[in-house]
Image (cartoon, grey):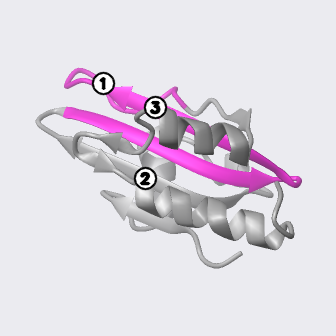
Amino acid sequence: MSEAVFLHDWENDEGLMDDFEITEGALEGVEILLASYTYENYSGDAFVLFRKGGKLYEVNGGHCSCYGLEGQWDPEETTVAELRHRLTEGNLGRYYGNEFADELSAVLDRIEKEAGGGA
């Protein structure tokens, strides 16, 4: 897989680690595929997709003006099919201000290509 895609307020994994208040140990063995975070009008929304041990995981976070993303690093296992369904039938990646649907779709295309058409 090519380099990670960092969008909006994140340029690298350091910003991600700072905002979630996690250590490098939390990212050991992790291949970040896509990470998007927007902070606007005192509120923020985040989405992270990563691969670890051959499995896909996502982290979703959000906050109002009172807090940040701290304590919200809670990876959940996911699949390409689940993410595609949420892209086409839901609003994943289409949140006002934190839009990443096109980039996520491209990442999922690469994952499927790597897997030989199915993941």
* Quadrant of image for the N terminus: bottom right
Disc 2 marks a residue whose amino acid type is Ala
Report x, y in % for residue 88: 50, 41
Question: Which residue appears at 50% of the width and 42% of the height?
Answer: 87
Mark 3: secondary structure: loop
Tag shown at residue 67 = 1
- Which residue is disc 3 drawn over? 90
Question: Which residue appears at 41% of the width and 41% of the height?
Answer: 46
Question: Which residue appears at 11% of the width and 36% of the height?
Answer: 41
- Graded by Cα atoms within 10 Å as few (under 14), some (14 to 19) or many (20 or more), the crowding at tag 3 reads few
Q: From mark 3 to mark 1, how far is it between C-alphas?
A: 27 Å
Q: From mark 2 to mark 3, how far is it between C-alphas?
A: 11 Å
The residue stretch that appears in magenta: 43-72
Of all residues, the one furthest to the bottom in this rendering is 2
* Pick the front one: 87 or 77: 87
Tag shown at residue 104 = none
* Pick the front one: 30 or 26: 30
Report x, y in % for residue 109: 64, 65
For residue 7, above or below residue 61? below
